[in-house]
Image (cartoon, helix red, strand yellow):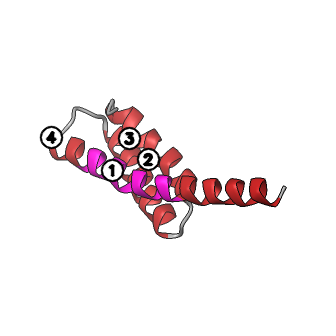
Amino acid sequence: MKLRITVAAALLALSGSAFAFHCPADMKKIDEAMAKSPKLTEAQMSEVKKFRAEGETLHKAGKHQESVDTLAKAMKILNVK
């Protein structure tokens, strides 16, 4: 039983760090797409910038799943995968 709890705790810790490395990759994709001057409305551009900034703030706060989810919203607007 102790072994199962230890293994579960280790897997949980590793999954959190996996998301931590995912955030910067998503931010880079967003930045690269923005550098290409995508054809977006001003409202869409504003949303992308807002989600990008929120995603970075969440990442720095250690809220990696929330960061990934927020950055995904920006990537969807930009049609980035």
Q: How many angstroms separate mark 2 from mark 4 (CA)?
A: 18 Å
Q: Residue at x 45, y 41 (%)?
A: 72
User: Mark 3 to mark 2: distance in Å?
Assistant: 17 Å
Tell me which numbered mark, 2 or 1, is placed earlier along the sequence. 1
Q: Is residue 71 magenta?
A: no
Magenta stretch: give its range: 17-31
Which residue lies under the disc numbered 4? 36
* Tag nearer the camera, 3 or 2: 2
Q: Which residue in the structure is indicated by mark 2?
A: 71
Mark nearest the camera among 3 and 1 is 1
Packing grade of label 4 (10 A; few <14, some 14-19, many >=20) is few
- Mark 2 neighbour class, 10 Å CA radius: few under 14, some 14 to 19, many 20 or more: many
**How far, Cα to Cα, is label 3 from label 1?**
24 Å
Cα distance in 3D space between marks 2 and 1: 10 Å
What kind of residue is marked 3?
Ala
Of residues 81 and 7, the one nearer the viewer is: 7
Identified by mark 2, the residue type is Leu
Residue 25 numbered mark, or none: 1
Q: Secondary structure at mark 2?
A: helix
Q: Residue at x 21, y 36 (%)?
A: 38
* Residue 77 position in % (x across, y down): 38, 34
User: Which type of secondary structure does the marked residue at label 3 adopt?
Assistant: helix
When the figure is inspected, residue 62 is found, relative to residue 31, above or below; the finding is below
The secondary element bearing badge 1 is classed as helix
Tell me the mark number nearer the camera, choosing from 4 and 3: 4
